[in-house]
Amino acid sequence: MANKHYRDAAAALEGVLFNGMTICAGGFGLCGIPERLIDAIREAGTTGLTIASNNAGIDGEGLGKLLRTRQVAKMISSYVGENKEFERQYLSGELEVEFCPQGTLAERCRAGGAGIPGFYTKTGVGTLVAEGKEVKTFDGEDYILERGIRADLSIIKGWKADESGNLIFRKTARNFNQPMATAGLICVAEVEEVVPVGSLNPDHIHLPGIYVKRMIVGSPYDKKIEFRMTRAREAA
Amino acid sequence: MANKHYRDAAAALEGVLFNGMTICAGGFGLCGIPERLIDAIREAGTTGLTIASNNAGIDGEGLGKLLRTRQVAKMISSYVGENKEFERQYLSGELEVEFCPQGTLAERCRAGGAGIPGFYTKTGVGTLVAEGKEVKTFDGEDYILERGIRADLSIIKGWKADESGNLIFRKTARNFNQPMATAGLICVAEVEEVVPVGSLNPDHIHLPGIYVKRMIVGSPYDKKIEFRMTRAREAA
Amino acid sequence: MPWDRNGMAARAAKELRDGYYVNLGIGIPTLVANNIPDGMTVTLQSENGMLGIGPFPYEDEIDADLINAGKQTISELPQSAYFGSEQSFAMIRGGHIDLTVLGAMEVAENGDIANWMIPGKMIKGMGGAMDLVAGVKRVIVVMEHNSKDGGPKFVAECTLPLTGKNVVDMIVTDLAVFRRPDHRAPFELVELAPGVTPEDIRVRTTARYV
Amino acid sequence: MPWDRNGMAARAAKELRDGYYVNLGIGIPTLVANNIPDGMTVTLQSENGMLGIGPFPYEDEIDADLINAGKQTISELPQSAYFGSEQSFAMIRGGHIDLTVLGAMEVAENGDIANWMIPGKMIKGMGGAMDLVAGVKRVIVVMEHNSKDGGPKFVAECTLPLTGKNVVDMIVTDLAVFRRPDHRAPFELVELAPGVTPEDIRVRTTARYV
């Protein structure tokens, strides 16, 4: 029987990495990022990467780790604040950046995964984002053509998966993991727990197993929080 | 507080119906169809309807009811077998039909609901479906431009909803209900049960409440089966 | 001796590989499910929104909310997953399904397929067939070698309206198997049913093949 | 006496209606959440994939898997729902959100908005701002009437790179409120902060308005 469950991140990425490849990475900020797989890519030393990811991590966390080692040639992102090393490489011209509106990025990756090479959107019309893109008028309104993104590899982080790769996410850690998972020729997932088939309700699956080609358990996770906000309990 | 929960289908459709309107209807065959809402549209007598629905019901069931009363001017569907009255009206020219590949139909409705007026697909290239449509080449392959569908009204059938409209489906009764729900300016849902907010796990919601503007409980349902197949239990 | 319906399905089933996700059309293709080799994991997709189709249900398990794309009652498996039609076809059109097995009225030597419409007859629609042939990684057609009136079905050019253009990878008939390595290559006759000669195929086929 | 930050948020909050689904930007717009009238149901959307944002969590409720679009920890409500980014922006771009309240560096008299980039400075990216202004039914900008150096922010034409073209419906500044009924109409001065005169506005604004 086909086995998708690998020993560790290095094993799950074996034979998949090559210099100059394109990777779609899930996560929003440091929430729901594929930490173990990022670490394994750093260890593997693969260079010249083009990475589509909403953010670029922060210094020394998330994709920031691959920036520090200069393995990244280009980022396709919507927001890259909170990252000094990123700023340095970007301003010095070492790192190429394609800014892409957040919704357009999510839709481009979903489209790539759904066999759609291009779609029209109102987002970015009349802005720098529209430069060099086809404009088409539908029902009297202008839209720009955006391209679907297909990647050589998707790396995502889930909560639980069953042995067949059916996967569920937890709260807002779902974010970009869902569309990114579909855009790669191969999707490797890391999860907090792998459970036997039959443990998950078939109506609750967020990402059907067909998308998950390889997976690992990455626990225990030391989940980082960027902005820790709380409120005080009212006195009784 | 905003109340989405209506007494019955007639009440939920009040002020929404008009002759010549476009409706997106969920369901696949007779599975997961909005029966009560179809009945109420029949009662209301609204005519000249354009209905986007994967199928057109069977004689006297599902959308077949609105065909029988000649309320439908045009169907946008992928498959319309098993329907004598449909066949009669279609062959006599009373009923217009736009055949749309099943995946293209699902994607067109999702696109309409997502603000995408057009997208490219390989489905139908070089066939009758491509006639009159723009062809564009991406990376050496031809694709055709398909339009997003927006409707005046979506009618869908869910399993359970909470009072805020968060909705879950059951098994393959989900089908087209999900994309169709997003394509209408107003979406009216019928469900088997409405539960208090907090009863559904926020990670299990299939259709967030923002899409569901009005809803009714349609139970009890006498769910019809088109092809009843079984296997025998092995003798002990 | 030509292959019977099950023989054709069994031959198509030899193309299955461990871990494949597969969509089977109505008719003979459905029989492929009965020919999955023991110990091989093959997951069947139903385009109405399910991965992991189980067998027909026992009488007391019948559930109107659980049907396949042919609208027949089915059962679920421990590894089943449900999703909406937009996700189901994103899967199909995005190239995530490894293999589809479909019936056809005609296949042309250039890989065109016609299986949805006969002009002058009532048109029922293409359902998901155009999406499947356009999107699935590998398309296998299973069909009788000749129509009931004896006419060829593997032809030089389709006479019926197309379902897809240059999409078929392999053809299994009751008499023979044709295959091509890619969409630029011609079909090759790679196998004959027991007792069938190359000459039998030649006289009953108008398509060019090698 | 000009409105303070909370005063501006309170003014924007008057545009809320029962049953609205709303997306609030970072900064002053966030304060709108504290000004939702009692008894009114307003559901807040977070573009990273949540409907029904709750307040900041108690210390012992903090969950790294539960953050808002500003990457701050938040809590959930009984009516909350989670979804992926593609669904979140399908919601935003498909016109399902009733209202968004955003900050801006400049708004032009034709409804253009600039709020994501200052040439020559480090570019952080537009995040979801371009999607919000293009897709949400009604766009309200809350901003200081003038920049720190006293320059106008409601201008004849934006000098900074645009976030969206002809998308703003209403502007709330610390001094006044401007509104237009549709995207072809000019902005109208409809309200003044206490003690502010029309003349005050005239000299501190380069945009034309009626």
Image (cartoon, coloured by chain):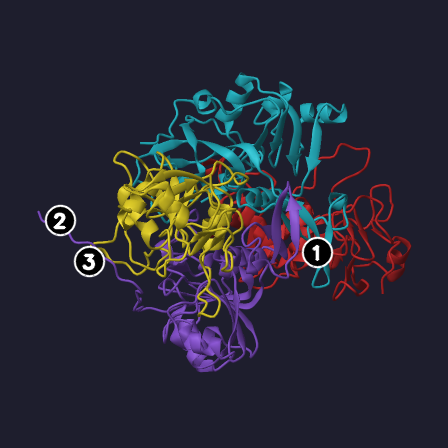
Chain colours: A purple, B cyan, C red, D yellow
Q: Residue at 68%, 49% (x, y): give it.
A: B145
Residue B236 quadrant = top left
Look at label 1 and name its amino acid: Ile
| Residue D193 position within the rendered picture, expressed as x and y whole percent measured from the top left | 31, 42
Q: Is residue A91 left or right of residue D67?
A: right
The residue closer to the viewer here, D201 or D11, is D201
The residue closer to the viewer here, A141 or B149, is A141
Tag of residue A234:
2
Front of the two marks 2 and 1: 2
Look at label 2 and name its amino acid: Glu
Mark 1 and mark 3 residues within 8 Å of each other at the beta carbon? no
- Disc 2 to disc 1, C-alpha distance: 67 Å
Q: Residue at 42%, 54% (x, y): give it.
A: D153
Disc 3 marks which residue? Answer: D59
Tag of residue D162:
none
The residue closer to the viewer here, A232 or A192, is A232
Disc 1 marks which residue? Answer: C140
| Residue A160 position within the rendered picture, expressed as x and y whole percent measured from the top left | 38, 59
- Disc 1 to disc 3, C-alpha distance: 59 Å
- Disc 3 to disc 2, C-alpha distance: 12 Å
Dot 1 falls on a residue whose secondary structure is: strand
Residue A167 quadrant = bottom left
Dot 2 falls on a residue whose secondary structure is: loop
Q: Residue at 49%, 47% (x, y): give it.
A: D109
Mark 2 and mark 1 residues within 8 Å of each other at the beta carbon? no
Front of the two marks 1 and 3: 3
> In the image, are marks 1 and 3 on the same chain?
no
